[in-house]
Amino acid sequence: MSNRESLSKKIADIFDLPRDLVANSFRLTVVGRRQLFVENHKGIILYDKELIRLKVQGGEVRISGAELQVRTVYTHEIYIEGVIKNINLEVLQ
Amino acid sequence: MKGGRQAGCVKVRVQGFQAEELINQASNKSINIWNIEKQGSAVIFSTDFHGLKQLRGLEKDREFKVEILRESGFSVWLRRIWRRKFWMLGFFCFCLAIYYLSGLVWNIELKGADKIDSKELVEYIGDFGLYKWGKVRNLELNDIEQNLYLKFPEIAWVAVERKGTKVVISLVEKKYNPMQFGAVIDIVAEYDGIIFEMMVLKGIAKVKPGMTVAKGDVLIAGYRDGDQVVNAAGSVKGKVFIEGYGEAALVEIEQSYTGNQRKVDILELWGKKITLSRMPNYEHYEVEELPTKVFRDCIVLRHRLYSEVTRRTNNFSPGEAEELARFRALIAADAQLNPYAVITNKEVESLSEQSPFIYRVLLTVETDIGSEMVQIRGE
């Protein structure tokens, strides 16, 4: 954990604030097996029908499945649809 | 973002840009894109006009090709309309025609005119600008009402209302009160009967006890004495025979309203009927029909009021049916009596021995048979 992240964590604990808000952490929202909403991502690494790789703070998120499609892209928000089979979170050391 | 989509959005194909790079660029530059599809080396996606403008900006820096596949939205629609000048002109003329036609009197409906000459009234209101195909917006309806009161003293109440392109004149005529005009009052027989007692207070007696009179005969006559009017006054008692008939069958169908009603509009175009509203699915119903002519006899709008009824079958034994017929005959006879009549004799006679059973009731009553009536015979 970087110094900045640990500082953010401490601030969030002191003021009793949600950590994702203070530390600008990413957030994944999965609706059933077909919808995924990713907030605070840092960019898309790979976009394919079977695999989507997203760069997030401190690592990457791999979404594998079938007929995957990026439905909407807003600033720092991405909405993915398709048959989601696996969501993998990889932490970069 | 939503406002941008409503204003208009485009579906574009971008050649020479990796999908990942495009999404990252869009995310960084706050370009809203959606429905992103990879198609070989090209990327197809939708964006709003603001996003398209930003993409065009990127086009200068990078070498890629933006091809518009489809445009949609309000601004696109407006642009298309603007290109069709004649369509616009036609639409404008149509709106203008609707506005102009809605400002004319299409129809004048007169309600309640019985003794008043409708033609004269319609001609009179024409002087105030209220005539068919005249302008409806400048009409002073209150002034017309006030002038109608002055012109036609027979009017007790009048209301001139505008209902869209129709003007409805509803009026109530004054009821003729003979006393106000000095008419003479007679006392005439209300029933057929034999007079047995008579007292004349005013007027001339036209009959005397023992005489048989028919309904409508003058019993005591009023008269004029110069300018003086002498109205008949007095009491005439007579023996009256009143008949009542009653009928009852062994099986009777009783019908009653459920209170459910539905109005159905039917448009009749040159004899061909088109139902404008759904027909009710009542099992039994009664129909009241009110035709409204729209254009001569060619176009007729009919309003039909369907009232739902329930039908109940009543079965009676012969004894019950006979009793019911007798009772109905008594009620029929009794309904003809005034409340002060004294029944002196009652005869009940059966006219039919089998269903339907018919009974006749003959009442002999002593009652006041005279009633006041305006003299209609000559002076």
Image: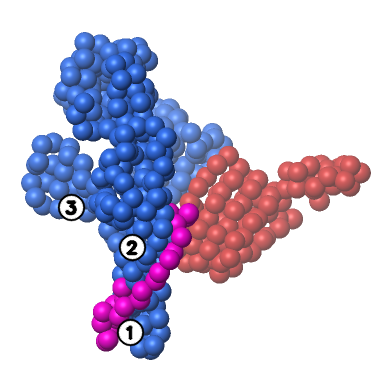
Chain colours: A red, B blue
* Mark-to-mark CA distance, 3 and 2: 53 Å
From what the image shows, is residue A66 above or below residue B261?
below
Quadrant in the picture for the C terminus of chain B: top left
Mark 3 falls within which chain? B
Q: Which residue is disc 1 drawn over?
A: B250
Give the percent coordinates (x, y) of residue A35: 55, 59
Point 9% across, 41% down: residue = B297
Give the percent coordinates (x, y) of residue B34: 46, 46
Mark 3 or 2: the one toward you: 2
Query: Relative to the observer, which residue lies in front, A25 or B4?
Result: B4
- Which of the 4 image quarters holds residue B174? top left
Same chain under badges 1 and 3? The reply is yes
- Magenta segment, which residues? B338-360
Q: For the residue marked with disc 3, what is the amino acid?
A: Ile
Query: Relative to the observer, which residue lies in front, B190 or B224?
Result: B224
Q: Under tag 2, what secondary structure?
A: strand
Res B274 label: 3
Point 74% across, 55% down: residue = A93
